[in-house]
Amino acid sequence: MTSSVTSPADVINVALRRIGYKLRVGNLYEGSFAAKQALDIYAQTRDEILRQDDWGFAERNINMTLLKQAPVNGYIPPVTWTPVYPALPWLFEYVYPDDCLKVRAVKSVPLFIPNFDPQPNVFSVENDNALAPPAKVVLCNVPNPVMVYTGQITDPSTWEADFVEALCAALGRRLAPVLVGLDVAKMEASDEGASTAMAEAEEG
């Protein structure tokens, strides 16, 4: 079952309500004090919570794109290792997806399906400074593999409810020290004025 939130503002408002902050935000760019504080930490906190667990909705499976391959016959003189090959001791170097937050597994494509005895494959995530520009890559010894990874899923309407709970809790812990305290009344008054001004502007 998916969560009932549909926007980042919905997530922030749940977090604000749980820490006892009385006002709501219309969106993360409205300019209110609470919105500015939330904007600073929202994306980083979301990605951190995505990385912490293997959330089902965030799982992605792709065929990996080859960047480099070791010589078929190995490094036998006169063939020696150079940066045109994968870092030792790996045989293959693959593209790290732009939306990947965490590599979960690198899987061999089975010859027969179903595969009743799947085996894990060792892999490494490293930076290849020999590329132009330098880039993060995935190294392994598996030809033509499938990568399972956690994607950077930004649409709240696709999140599961338990992920929303975890994200709201994390945001609340980070927002509470700056929003709930001796100056909370002053902050709320400032936010209320900013929200009113924005609403009046939108109404023309």
Image (cartoon, grey):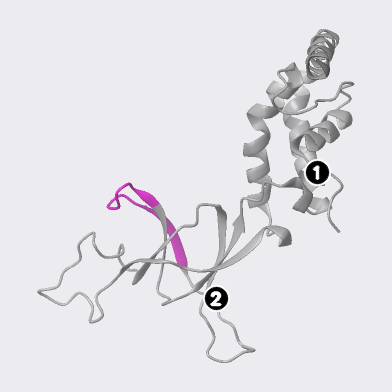
Mark number, residue 84: none
Q: Position of residue 29 (x, y in %)?
A: 69, 25
The amino acid type found where label 2 is placed reads: Pro
Work out whether mark 2 precedes mark 1 in sequence or the reverse, and give the earlier one.
1
Q: Position of residue 112 (x, y in %)?
A: 57, 92
Mark 2 sits on what residue? 120
Query: Tag 2, which secondary structure?
Result: loop
Instruction: Specify the quadrant that holds the N terminus.
Output: bottom right
Q: At 50% across and 74% down in the image, what residue appears?
A: 121
In magenta segment, residue 129:
yes
Q: Position of residue 158 (x, y in %)?
A: 76, 53
In the depicted structure, whether residue 37 falls above or below residue 89: above
Q: Is there CB contact under 8 Å for labels 2 and 1?
A: no
Distance Cα–Cα, label 2 vs label 1 = 37 Å
Q: Quadrant of residue 118?
A: bottom right
- In this picture, residue 139 sits left or right of residue 44: left
Mark 1 sits on what residue? 6
Q: At 61% across and 88% down in the image, what residue appears?
A: 115
Query: Tag 1, which secondary structure?
Result: loop
Q: At 83% across and 51% down in the image, what residue appears?
A: 161
Q: Position of residue 106 (x, y in %)?
A: 52, 70
Instruction: Specify the quadrant that holds the C terminus.
Output: top right
Q: Which residues are magenta?
A: 123-135
- In this picture, residue 10 sits left or right of residue 155: right
The amino acid type found where label 1 is placed reads: Thr
